[in-house]
Amino acid sequence: MTAFSHLLTHQADGVFTITMNRPDALNALNEELAMELNTALRIAQREADVRCVVLTGRGRGFCSGQDLKELAGPGGGQPPHTDFANLLRQRYNPLIVRMRTMEKPVVAAINGVAAGAGVSLALAADLKLCTRQATFILAFANIGLVPDAGATLTLLQHVGYARAAEMCLLAEPISAETALQYGLVNRIVDENELESATRALATRLARMPTRSLALAKRALNQGWNATLDEQLALETYLQQTAGESADYREGLRAFLEKRPPAFRGV
Ligand code: T3D
């Protein structure tokens, strides 16, 4: 298993768990953490025995976004020039694309505050659990930046324009309850139950027909920009593909034999 300095990884029962591990900085994304996260997601995507990916953070934060101290550089003077375009292309955009297009479900277990690109990461997951203490802050405007790492799209997809504009323009924290009400997260759990609830959800997903989940994810991703005709054509193609999988045959057999299916993810 690859060794990481700012990440913890763990694999069991088809679930690959990635824990961001810079708790003193609320898991702010410095270059190392961002690049390691890219590597870990690449591994999770590649390994056939990984059938669900969990992203979480250690300590009281999920992820506080870009490491602002890294941007500020050493000393207290004028911050140095940052090539933001390069930073996004190198670190953030590949992360978001990988999470959204990975052919297996990605679960975010949001253990605390998510800020800036930390919210973008959470939004890129397919399913989200958070603790009652979790908060979400699109903090970009507080430092004169623009929401990025996909958030201007994924936030709109989750909450609609009025709420997205409020979150982006006012950059105020929203609570876990509000996040649930807005549709930003799927479920709130008590802090001491996050691990077990995440494990139960992820293990369940890992036992499902991975190929069909991947195809459903692709259909949902593409649905946003499609016309009805385009989406019907895509669904037709995806269903034909799913119908040729071993898991479809197993699912149908199991139904007829009145037993639970044993999906293998192929
Ligand atoms: O290319 C590009 O476009 C760049 C990409 C940009 C994407 C972005 O993510 S921009 C947005 C960056 N993030 C933020 O602006 C959030 C900054 N942090 C905060 O606003 C607050 O820390 C929180 C609301 C997240 C939490 O507040 P609180 O009061 O619970 O904790 P705290 O005391 O502020 O933070 C605890 C420690 O974490 C503290 O360390 P210290 O100073 O006591 O040693 C704090 O400095 C550190 N920390 C928190 N966030 C960051 C951070 N260190 C570096 N970078 C951070 N983003």
Image (cartoon, rainbow, N blue to C red):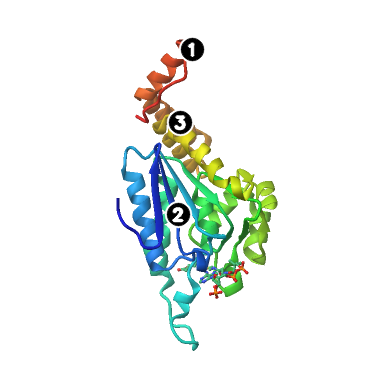
Along the viewing direction, whichever of 201 and 173 lies nearer the viewer: 201
**Residue indicated by mark 2:** 19
Between circles 1 and 2, the one closer to the viewer is 2
Residue 195 position (above or below residue 257): below
Rounded to the nearest whole Å, what is the CA distance between mark 1 and mark 2? 39 Å
Mark pair 3, 1: CA separation: 28 Å
**Residue 37 picture location, percent across and down:** 39, 57
Within 10 angstroms of label 1, few (less than 14), some, or many (20 or more) residues? few
Give the spatial CA distance, label 2 vs label 3: 35 Å
Tell me which residue sits at (45%, 60%) in the image. 21
Q: Residue 171, how many percent across, how many down?
A: 64, 66
Residue 25's x, y, as percent?
51, 68
Q: Amino acid at mark 1?
A: Lys
Q: Which mark is residue 235?
A: 3
- The single residue placed furthest to the top in the displayed view is 257
- Front tag of 3 and 1: 1
The amino acid on which the numbered mark 3 sits, given as a three-letter code, is Glu
Vertical arrangement, residue 244 with respect to residue 222, above or below: above
Q: Which mark is residue 258?
A: 1
Check residue 150 in the rendering and tell me which mark sits there, or answer none. none
